[in-house]
Image (cartoon, helix red, strand yellow):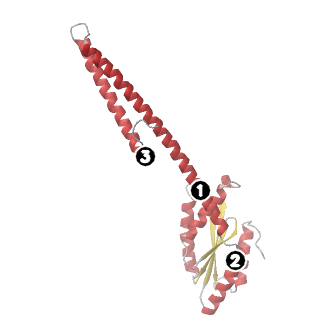
Amino acid sequence: MHIFDHIEASKIDRRDEQLWVLAIAMILIFSGGLGVLAYPAAFSTPAPVNGTWVRRVFVGFCVLSLLLIGYLIERQVIIRRLRSRLMEERTRAARLLSQASADLLETLPRFPHFQDRLAMEFRRAVSLQHTLSLLVACLKLAADLEGRPEASAAFGDAAKAMVRKLRGEDSIYLFSPGIFGILLPGVRGVDAHRVANRLADSLHDVSGASNRFSFEMQVVNYPEHVAAAREMEQAVRAVVSQVGGEELAA
């Protein structure tokens, strides 16, 4: 049960500052009071210090000191509890975000879906004489994240960052852990490189100052680099094999 008013968690820093201001002010008051009481004894003619007013001042001083000490202790206990609760909430929120990022990976379509979409988009590009580009993003985890639960969260954060930069008609796929493919219908090779640069900026931000992962981006374009859907699929297999990813379905 709180003795004094309730402190909201969102105002903890402000109340902490107020508490320190109050403590400093009361210390100054007590110091001044002690100085005033001690001045006559130090500089006046010696005289017996007695009387009712002296006892009242002494009792009042003691009661005020005890109240201040009790108030400061109670405030500090509440602030310590709130800080502990905030740390727990932040840890819980970070854990939920990491879990959400890891769950996102499970929802991404895999290589078989990519094959179906590639065949459809390629037929459309050929019939309408449009271009078709594919970006392959290969992420490599930092050594301290290998084999840890944070690895899935890092890949999930990267996927979210890339999804936010894509158009509605673009599609993203997970070929292997850390290897993503992005189909860009109607995008020329030079424009695909611009898209890759934008995605690279987002991945740099997600990687953070701790450099959770490094990455490479490769662009495959029809008709600049390949002339058939099969060739684009083989290019994906070659990239996955080169970086040591899982073997893709036939």
Q: Secondary structure at mark 3?
A: loop
Q: Measuring 37% from the left and 28% from the top, which residue is drawn there?
A: 67
Q: Amino acid at mark 3?
A: Glu
Q: Give the label, 3 or 2, closer to the camera.
A: 3
Question: Spatial distance from mark 2 to mark 1, Cα to Cα?
Answer: 28 Å
Q: Which residue is mark 2?
A: 113
Question: Spatial distance from mark 3 to mark 2, Cα to Cα?
Answer: 50 Å
- In the image, 127 versus 120, the foreground residue is 120
Are circles 2 and 1 on residues that touch, CB within 8 Å?
no
Q: Amino acid at mark 2?
A: His
> In terms of image quadrants, where is residue 247?
bottom right
Q: Secondary structure at mark 2?
A: helix
Q: Give the label, 3 or 1, closer to the camera.
A: 3
Q: Which mark is residue 96?
A: 1
Whether residue 214 appears in this view of the structure is no
Looking at this rendering, what residue extends furthest in the front direction? 1
Instruction: Give percent across and percent down for residue 19.
Output: 38, 37
Pick whichever of labels 3 and 1 is earlier in the sequence. Answer: 3
Pick whichever of labels 3 and 2 is earlier in the sequence. Answer: 3
Are circles 3 and 1 on residues that touch, CB within 8 Å?
no
